[in-house]
Structures are given as C-alpha cells and as structure tokens.
Image (cartoon, helix red, strand yellow):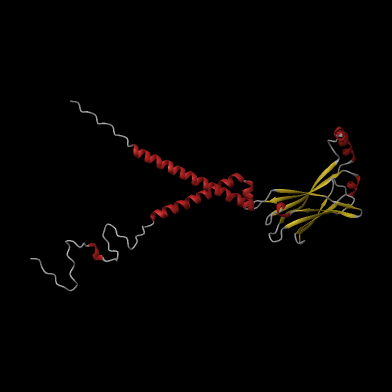
Amino acid sequence: MAPTAAPPPRMDWDAVALWGERVVTYSVRFWMLFVLASTSAISAYLMVYRSVVPDASHVRALHFYFADGVEPMAEAALGEVAMAPGHAYALSLCLEMPESEPNQLAGNFMVELSVHAWNNETLLATRRPAILRYRSGLVHALWTVAALPLLLIGRAEERQTLRIPLHELFDNPRKTPAAWARVRLSKPALQVYSAELRVDAIFRGLSYYMHTYRFATALVSVSAVVFVQFVLLAMLQFRGRAAPPNIAGGAVGDRGLDPRGSGDAGLSSGDESPLPPSGARRRPPR
C-alpha cells in the first residue's frame, strides 16, 4: 500500500488573532505618541521663532509740520512691534518730492534722525545729506515731451523718490527699547509729497538661519525634538521593565519562608524532627 500523505498543519487562529491585536495596539499607540510629540515640537519651535526672529520690515508714515522759518519736523511711534528689544535694525527715510524750482534751488539738505526711549532718553542721533537727482534742461524737456500723454491723463508726475539711509546698524537695547523717533529736515523751503520711515531688521546668528532657511531649519529642529522625546520615552519604558521586583518583608512564597526571617521555618511540623539544641550530642542510629 502507498504511504498516505501527512495532513497539512492546522492554522492556529487564536495566535493569529493575538498577533493582529498586538500589531493594531502598538500601531495606534505609536501614532498617538508621534502626533503628540510632533504637536509639542512644532509649538515649541513656533514659540522660539517668535522670540528669536523679528518682523523683517516696518514702515511708519511721517507727517511733517511746516511753518515759516521753522525746519520741517515729524514724529513716529515705534514700540516693540516695529523694533523688538534686543535686535538690530537699519533705518532709512523715503521722501517723495516734486521736481519743483524750490527743491532744485535748495540743493543739498540735511536729514536728522533721533530715536528715543519711553523715558525720552536719546538712543540714537544721526544726520545724513540728501539732494534731488540732477537733470539738465534739455533732458527734462525731452522727457516731458515723451511723457506728455501720460502727464495729461495723470498717469505720470514730475517727481522723484529719494531713499536716504540714516543708520545701518542700530542695536535696540532690552532695558530701554526704542519708543518713538523724530525726523527733521534742515531747509524750510523744501516741498514734500509724502515721507516714510522704514525699519528693516538685520538678522544675525540663529535668527539669520531661521529666517533665510525657514523650511530646512524647521524640519531639522522639529525632527530633533521629536527624536529626543522618543528616546526619553524609550528610556523610561525600559527602566521600568528592568527594575527588580519589590519583595515585601511579610510576603511568603512557595519556598515557605518565615515572615520573621528565621531560616529554620522552612521545616514543617510533620514527620521532620526538630533540630537538637546547640551543644547537645546527637545519638547514633541503631
């Protein structure tokens, strides 16, 4: 007779179900921890970003006060919104001036800037020269003829915009930060359409990388924080598993230990004979 084939092994469905349950449990636990760690890391990074990286630029409109024989003057509020304490800034003035005869005859003029704290302490005082760009009469006439249609419909104007750098590096102190600024023009005959004080942040050190390479810095920082959190959780988990069991003094196990700590308590009171007292002679068996 031909030998019969061995029956195939039966599937242990209980083991499969237990394995699937463990996989699902550990997967859900892992993703919950990952979401919590990522959320906390992103929140921490945003807090650090707001404290380290200031806003790139701010613009404050200036409204000059004009009077006969008085130098035009304007003031603007700064505060912590425009100039965060502990950061460096560059200050510049944007003047929109008409190409009028008084402005052409004024020639060079001085722009004075002073920055003050909330207690009126002067933090910065600087003066810079400025002048309208020169155009000869022939060039001005040719430009007027070429732009005449736009000038007639109001799409072009005979004006110039000057940007005057006033200070390239101003470190705003933390104890007495800048609160307001004053701008003064040296010649009262100047004519101005509009003026703006521009505040540009200067990024140095960590703030430079966080502002210039935002995505890369955020990815590296958040990943590092999440990795450190998982390492700490793993260390705590393995530390709890490796801790020795705490055996209480009164616990009695299978070995029959005496709660009072006596080593002779392991002998029962049945067929076993008690030990002789110390110093007594043992009788030999017959």
Q: Taking 248 as reference, is 114 left or right?
A: right
Residue at far bottom of view: 279
Q: Taking 110 as reference, is 4 left or right?
A: left
> Residue 70's x, y, as percent?
89, 55
Residue 221 in sight = no
> Residue 132's x, y, as percent?
85, 46
Quadrant of the rendered structure where residue 236 is? bottom left
Q: Taking 180 as reference, is 142 left or right?
A: right
Give whichever of 283, 58 is nearer the camera: 283
Labels in figure, total: 0
Q: Quadrant of the N terminus?
A: top left
Q: Quadrant of the C terminus?
A: bottom left
Residue at far front of view: 270
Give whichever of 37, 252 is nearer the camera: 252
> Residue 50's x, y, as percent?
64, 51
Give whichever of 270, 163 is nearer the camera: 270
Give whichever of 21, 104 is nearer the camera: 21
Residue shown at 37% from the left, 41% from the top: 18
User: Is residue 165 shown above or below 272?
Assistant: above
Residue shown at 55% from the left, 49% from the top: 41
Quadrant of the rendered structure where residue 254 is? bottom left
Q: Taking 99 as reference, is 24 left or right?
A: left
Residue at far left of view: 286
> Residue 48's x, y, as percent?
61, 52
Residue 36 in sight = yes
